[in-house]
Image (spheres, rainbow, N blue to C red):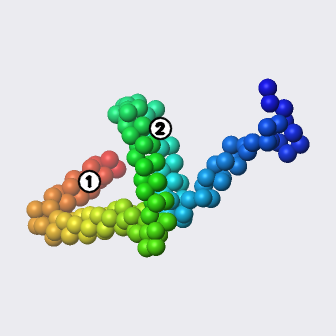
Amino acid sequence: MVKRTKGGKGAKGGKGKREKISAFYNQLCEPAQLYLILSVINVVFYLYMMTGKTNDYKTGGLVLHIVFNIVWLCILQYLCRSSLGKKIAWAIVLLPFFFYLLVLILVMCFMGSVSADLINDPLFQEAIREQNEKQIEAYMNNQ
């Protein structure tokens, strides 16, 4: 049994878990810190999805996620230590967000052009007119 001292540390003088985690986090460069935060959030969501009714998320996938995140974190930390590596590390961390934003913008533009074409289609306009007439007729019959 380890006795607690005044400082809250064990009798052996070791650091607490929070101090060790904080020291590890502070040793990482900024891109690796951001990636670590995003990875933890990702793993938490994965765990949440594993508890869902349709359990398509398996333990092997979780382990693969964690291993991939650790390897990627080490690569980012290694890149940060080289001369141009910090800029490359930032690019690697932020690149997926830029691609996501690009895909989102493209989908929105595509959906906008599709909806504009649909609204200008005479068959669509006729279908809307018929639906409106039926709704008006049903409303008038209920009064």
Residue extending farthest to the top is 1
Residue at screen point 51% across, 54% down: 36
7 w.r.t. 110: above or below: above
Q: How many marks?
A: 2
How far is the residue under mark 1 from the one under mark 2? 47 Å
Q: Nearer the viewer, residue 114 or 83?
A: 83
Q: Secondary structure at mark 1?
A: helix
**Rendered location of residue 73, percent (x, y):** 47, 54
The disc, 1 or 2, on the residue closer to the chain's N-terminal end is 2
Q: Looking at the picture, how far across and down is residue 38, in whole percent?
A: 49, 54
Q: Which residue is pictured at 11% across the width and 67% down the height?
A: 122
Percent across and percent down for residue 85 are 44, 69
Q: Quadrant of residue 105?
A: bottom left
Residue displayed at 21% across by 55% down? 131
Instruction: Examine the rendering and report whether any part of residue 131 can be seen.
Output: yes
The amino acid type of the residue labelled 1 equals: Gln
Disc 2, SS: helix
The N terminus sits in image quarter: top right
Q: Residues within 10 Å of mark 1 (few under 14, many from 20)?
A: few
Height in image: 45 above or below 115? above
Instruction: Read off the residue under disc 1.
Output: 135
Question: Is residue 1 found left or right of 107 in the rendered image?
Answer: right
The residue beneath circle 2 is 47
Q: Is residue 133 visible?
A: no
The residue lying toward the viewer, choosing from 134 and 15, is 15
Q: Is residue 113 left or right of residue 59?
A: left
Nearer the camera: disc 1 or disc 2: 2
Mark carried by residue 11: none
